[in-house]
Image: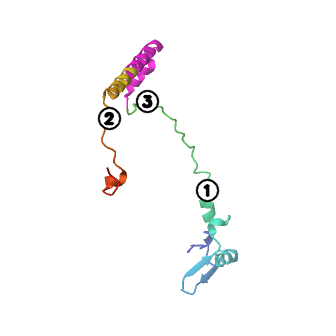
Amino acid sequence: MRVDRCDFSGFKVYPGRGRTYVRGDSKTFRFVTAKAESLFLQRKNPRKIAWTQVYRRMHKKGITEEVAKKRSRKNVKVQRGVVGADLASILAKRTAKPEVRAAARAAAITKAKTQKKEKEATKASRPQGASAPKISKQAAKGGKGGR
């Protein structure tokens, strides 16, 4: 016994049941009912019609026995180093006492201040009038306007 599938709904079409539709290009379609044939000829999409097998498969209907308990993944916290510092130095800074931190911060501030003073001193020692003569943009490009 040959059992076909309905080309619209996906139901089984047993011998002696259903309708066969032959299109102009000789392609045949089997339908379980006139309703399925009518909807097919109206060019309805079986994925949007709730009673078809395609719709039920797309929307996960009626697959209750296969559903197993979903496993949930637990987030695992991992500590990693950052670009500027490795993990050991980060942990050492975190566990350091507040007094040690304050002392290191004060030392860094004084170091930065001394560097800034040195930079300003070198700026002041340079003569200001010894800079290059000013040239306009046009003159730099090769046009008029130069001195």
Which residue bears the numbered disc 2? 129
Residue under label 3: 79
Density class for disc 1 (Cα within 10 Å; few <14, some 14-19, many ≥20) is: few
The kind of residue tagged 2 is Gly
Tell whether 7 sits left or right of 108. right
Q: For residue 19, what is the image quadrant? A: bottom right
Q: Residue furthest right?
A: 35
Can you see residue 142?
yes
Given this view, does label 1 or label 2 mark the residue nearer the observer? 2
Tag in front: 2 or 3: 2
Q: Position of residue 120 (x, y in %)?
A: 36, 26
Image: 140 above or below 54: above
**Mark 1: which secondary structure?**
loop
Among the two numbered marks 1 and 3 on one chain, the one whose residue lies closer to the N terminus: 1
Residue 60's tag is: 1
Magenta span of residues = 84-112
Asked whether 131 or 90 is in front, the reply is: 131
